[in-house]
Amino acid sequence: MTRIKTSYNRRSFMKISAAASGGMLIGFSWLNGCVPATPDKKTGLAVPKEWFDINGYIKIGDTGVVTIYSPNPEIGQNVKTSMPMIVAEELDIPWENVIVEQAPLNTGFYQNQFAGGSLSIRLSWNALRMAGATGRRMLMEAAAKEWGLAVSDVDAKDGMIHENNGERSVSYGEIASKAVGIEIPEEVELKEIKDFRLIGTSKKNVDGKKILKGEPLFGLDFKREGMKIAMIQHPPAFGMTVKDFNVDEIKNMPGVTDAFIVDTTLPEPGMFDEKGFLQLIAIVGESTWPLMQAKKAIKANWETVDALEDSETHTKRLEKALESGKASEIRKDGNPDAAFKKAAKVIERTYSAPFIAHNTMEPMNFFAHVTENSAELIGPTQTPEAMEKSVSKLLDMPIENITVNMTRIGGGFGRRLYVNFGVEAAAISKRIGAPVKLIYTREDDMSQGTYRPTYRSRYKAGLDENNNLIAFSVKGAGLPESPVFPKRFPAGAVENYVAERIHGKTNVTTGAWRAPRSNFTAGAEQSFLDEVAELAGKDPIDFRLELFERAMNNPVGEEHDYEAERYAGVLKMVKEKSNWGEEKPGVYRGVAAYFCHSSYVAEVFDMIMVNGQPKIKKVWCAVDCGIVVNRDAAKNMVEGGVIDGIGHSMYSKLTFANGAASEMNFDRYQLIRHSQVPEEIEVFFVENEIAPTGLGEPGLPPAIGALANAMYKATGQRYYHQPFATERQVIG
């Protein structure tokens, strides 16, 4: 077994235990009560009369039922199931005896308690294993002490502790009360990966039945006695602020109890704070419908304080940036200029993508109850700690007086990394002196900002007389950030390579959108590589594998971010699984592979034409993300990423006129329909013993390149500018 030092102490245990048995857990009793009202059907065990805190992740009932707390926000990536699976594996408890609870925010015990960057499992892998192993060890020590034995004389398995050289045994539930008093061991033994029995299997979503039955789980479901409802109206355009509005008229409308301007400006705002609309009109009442009618009746004086930008300006700004030659050179290997001059063939292409919105299924919402000395917030957030800090700044209140509890999140994709909606709820609650739930309309969200940035990149490649790639350059501009990753492929695989970045200015607020920057760069890069392979007269997979051979055997430059062998491995796997090279009449194939969030994904799209329109028949995915914790959940994340990538690159676009978003709802902003998703997606995982890496995002980026490459084969047209459906209409 692997031995690992524990990194928490008794004080941490006492802190989390106090929180779990106090107000925080009570506040979450409506979500997933720890003690069922009737005998538990899932575990088959009697309802516990007593519960014992073993550590901040584990609570054991006297009957053997175990509650495992899932620390990170559940955003649909199924960590509320997968994280407890890791704890249960090391604790060695039957999964059917486990109840899962959402843990409260506790920065004194849990680490990295957020959802973003595909980091939840990756950053918590060791901590979760340690929590389970520590609990197991403490239970063993308690039993050994009870029997007058050394801990080495007992073993634990399937929720039972057995005497190694005797017949005595005791269940976790029976010994749990004695384990509470055991000192935290300095180090514990972790299971060998080959001995895993739970990790790597498929377990159903612990909230699945509740979701199907419509039980309250999400922020929008939350209710509190005396709670008011609030809605906001922000300025109609970026570059505007509110001066005043017809406040008396709005207050006198039916169902409206208050209306006012609220200011959410923070001293020293953080990276997840609102940068665009800080002064808002807030309307308060008892229910949403009267407030929606009141919003329509607002007559505000909006003041222009900055430039009112439009989409044409954005496009020209990016084009000018690429032509300016003012890019900062961030990586250069060899002598690209000289190599391009002597190249036998040179190809250059430009790619672009527009601003796009997140469009979470659950409307943006948050509950807040601010009193003179405390603030309680409950709702769907990916960054509870950041929200806690921002609310502390807004209210000028000690952070220890603020609690943030997490509900299940009805979609985030990066949108709920940003905490403005919770901060706004807190500001409104303070103003009215009552608990309030703030709810956005779809139009509020789509016009408020935090969009995926708009990008434009230019790629150039040079081939020698033997069709070998001898020069490669990429220059990328974005508003506000460049999409270029200087150390990613093909860095390290080409003798002469240069990558340049250009950052632009805009007052349109942007933020992380699923697989930030990679969601554009993968599609552009992989489309371009296919075109280079065609110019070289080479199979697109074989062409890529040639480059990986160089990166493995004779890499160029000081370093690159990826492991070429693993990168090539997913390409080889998808080639084998899809029977690449096999002729299929009427089927057009595209391939792409990409590395991001420490994981490797290769995809092959099989496309057919139906009534002159491309239709995706099947997608083959090969994934190397290290150890897979929950196999079905992992497949679901990859499948969702593929569909998300197809939908947004094919159909979605947000444009601006005089600083205002032109697409305010789904009547003008197109998302993928059920009839447009692939008929089948098959996912294969590379089996290894590498600690888990990211998975919520890596499936999306290569889908865009594979889609573009398959569409080229099907239509004879290359696709450079998203959304592809619009480009096809213009050119086709």
Image: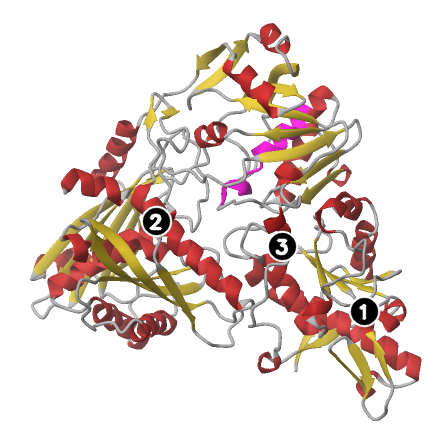
Check the image and report above or below for 658 versus 526.
Answer: above
Q: Is residue 401 magenta?
A: no
Q: CA distance from mark 1 to mark 3?
A: 23 Å
- Along the horizontal axis of the image, is 219 left or right of 236? right
Q: Viewer-proximal residue, 8 or 20?
A: 20
- Between 500 and 366, the residue placed more toward the observer is 366
Please state which amino acid type lies under the numbered disc 2: Ser
The span picked out in magenta is 414-428
Q: Looking at the image, which residue is at 30% across and 76% down?
A: 576
Identify the secondary structure beneath mark 3.
helix
Disc 2 + disc 1, Cβ < 8 Å: no
Give the residue pinned by disc 1: 64
For disc 3, the marked residue is 209
Could you tell me which residue is drawn at 49 percent across and 45 percent down?
414
631 with respect to 315 (left or right): right
Percent coordinates x, y for residue 587 in the rendering = 21, 63
C-alpha span from label 2 to label 1 = 47 Å
Q: How many marks?
A: 3
Residue ID at (38%, 56%): 642
Residue type at the position of mark 3 = Lys
**Please, which colouring scheme is shown?**
secondary structure
Q: Position of residue 367 (x, y in %)?
A: 67, 34
Q: Amino acid at mark 1?
A: Gly
Residue 519 appears in view: no
- Name the residue beneath numbered marker 2: 675
Main SS of the magenta segment? helix
Q: Secondary structure at mark 2?
A: helix
Pointer 1 local density, CA inside 10 Å: few below 14, some 14–19, many at least 20: many
